[in-house]
Image (cartoon, grey):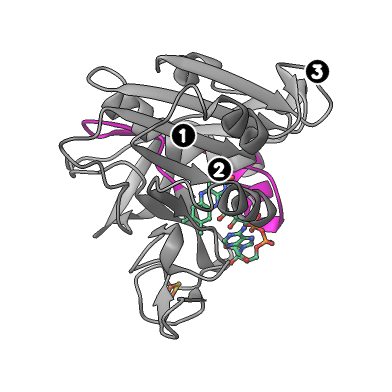
Amino acid sequence: MREVRATILENRAIADKIYSLTFHIEEEIPIDCGQFCMIGIAGHPLRRPIAICRAEGGRITVCYQVRGEGTRILAEDYKAGETLSVLLPLGNSFPVADGVRKIALVGGGVGIFPLISVLRKYAPEREVYSYMGFRNKAAMCMGYELERGKKLKVATDDGSVGMKGTAVQAFLSDLSENRPDVVFSCGPLPMLRALKKGMEGKDIPVYVSLEERMGCGIGACLVCVCDKKDGTHARVCKDGPIFDLKEIVL
Ligand SMILES: Cc1cc2nc3c(=O)[nH]c(=O)nc-3n(C[C@H](O)[C@H](O)[C@H](O)COP(=O)(O)OP(=O)(O)OC[C@H]3O[C@@H](n4cnc5c(N)ncnc54)[C@H](O)[C@@H]3O)c2cc1C
Ligand code: FES
């Protein structure tokens, strides 16, 4: 993990309250899919954790939703040419074993962003099936990235694009004819819980990327701790954010 000074190349809206931020760093740092960074925002002592969608050389793209004060400032005040302090890369990555051919991605809302890094890395060499859920058409974004896989099924809450329903419903409705070797998912807690219920007894490994509130992002403050089934705890920033669904309490 490094603390780097990043130069903003672009920071623009790509959907309703969703921004794409591309920055350049001098060093070329290896970044694996599912890892995240912590972005420093002026006037806020705590950095904001954001998944890395794309890393090509020193050019890195993250996408974020404007939620509270920090992301609002990031969207409004940070322009191309300005600099940011960023910690990266952080956390573990989505595990893809050698024998895995078919990967299913189930993403909801801002949970699609870490999954884009999986598509970029694995779609050229394996079969990647994407099931992505959005609130509505206005919230949908990154279609050109999501189409990299063998199949993309979009679901929206109001049916304005794709099927009416959730990413989990889209995935489960395909499962009998399209059984993946592994499932990677990221999204809001109710979505992950629905996925867990739907996968009971299916004997397919499922890994989920968790979104916990974070302080330091490097394993020191214990703000992000989650419960494990064996009674122990894990730090989402350092031991995760990706966990085997069987091992954690949701
Ligand atoms: C590993 C990881 C990856 C993430 N990737 C993305 C992404 O790719 N795109 C995206 O839009 N969002 C992502 N998030 C959520 C994002 O970090 C929060 O939306 C963001 O921190 C909110 O900051 P704020 O200042 O706007 O909100 P505020 O509510 O004002 O933030 C107050 C504090 O709470 C923390 N916080 C608030 N909500 C969250 C949250 N959901 N998760 C973690 N910390 C939170 C903030 O970091 C800050 O310290 C990710 C979270 C984690 C843990
Ligand atoms: S955020 Fe500090 S230990 Fe995870």
Task: Name the residue that disc number 2 marks.
Answer: 111
Callout 2, which amino acid? Gly
Residue positioned 45% across, 85% down in the render:
231
Answer yes or no: do the residues labelled 3 and 1 have beta carbons within 8 Å? no
Q: Quadrant of residue 65?
A: top right
Task: Name the residue that disc number 1 marks.
Answer: 105
Image region (quadrant) for ligand 2: bottom left
Task: Name the residue that disc number 3 marks.
Answer: 160
Give the mark toward the camera: 1 or 2.
1
Among the two numbered marks 2 and 3 on one chain, the one whose residue lies closer to the N terminus: 2
Answer yes or no: do the residues labelled 1 and 2 have beta carbons within 8 Å? no
Q: Residue pushed farthest bottom?
A: 231
The quadrant the C terminus occupies is: bottom right
Quick check: is 9 in the magenta stretch?
no
As displayed, is residue 167 above or below residue 174?
Answer: below
Could you say whether the residue bearing mark 2 is in a helix, strand or loop?
helix
Residue positioned 24% across, 44% down in the render:
31
